[in-house]
Image (cartoon, rainbow, N blue to C red):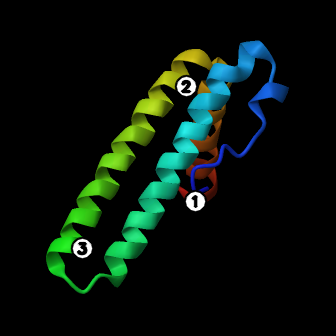
Amino acid sequence: MMSNIPLDLSKVKKEDVDREILRVGMIAELDAVNLYEQMAAMANDKNIKKMLLDIAKEEKTHVGEFQALLLNRDKEQVNELEAGKNEVKKEVGE
């Protein structure tokens, strides 16, 4: 993502902007998790590796913060997450 919002928020209905901002925040944090974990896998210095993995973990917390806010504002998302969980249980038993 590299600091670009992946959609034009000016084209989003006013009542949907906050939810889309939260989704973009989640995308940014997940992108950061991937970046830090990839860099940690390449790092030679154990302290750099440790620091990168710790930062990645913090980014995962940020994903949860954005998700919590989104779920408070988008009941359809709540229902679809539950449907997804049920589908996984049905299809693969987890």
At label 3, which amino acid type do we have?
A: Lys
Q: How far is the residue under mark 1 from the one under mark 2?
A: 27 Å
Give the camera-side residue of 82 and 2.
2
Which residue is rendered at x = 42% and y = 58% of the image?
Answer: 33
Q: Which residue is mark 1?
A: 92
Q: Residue furthest right?
A: 11
The answer to whether residue 2 is visible is: yes
Image-based side of 83 in relation to 9, left or right:
left
Which label sits on residue 49? 3
Q: What secondary structure is marked by label 1?
A: helix
Find residue 70 and name its label. Answer: 2
- Of badges 1 and 2, nearer the viewer stands 2
Mark 3 or mark 1: name the one nearer the start of the chain.
3
Tally of numbered discs: 3
How crowded is the residue under tag 1: few (<14 C-alpha within 10 Å), some, or many (20+)? few
Quadrant of the rendered structure where residue 79 is?
A: top right
Q: What x and y, as percent, mark residue 85?
A: 56, 42
Indicate left or right for 7 with 28 as reference: right
Q: Is residue 18 left or right of residue 26?
A: right
How far from the left and from the top, in percent, is residue 23? 61, 36
Work out whether residue 10 or residue 22 is closer to the camera in this orientation and state it.
10
Question: Is label 3 in a helix, a strand or a loop?
Answer: helix
Q: CA distance from mark 3 to mark 1?
A: 34 Å
Tell me the crowding category of disc 2: few under 14, some 14 to 19, or many 20 or more residues within 10 angstroms, Cα based: many
Q: Of tags 3 and 1, which is closer to the observer?
A: 3
Quick check: marks 2 and 3 in contact, CB under 8 Å?
no
Instruction: Find numbered disc 2 in the image and state the secondary structure of the residue it sits on.
Output: helix
Q: Nearer the viewer, mark 2 or mark 3?
A: 3
Residue located 57% across and 50% down the image: 3
Q: Could you say which quadrant of the image residue 65 lies in?
A: top left
Q: Amino acid at mark 1?
A: Val
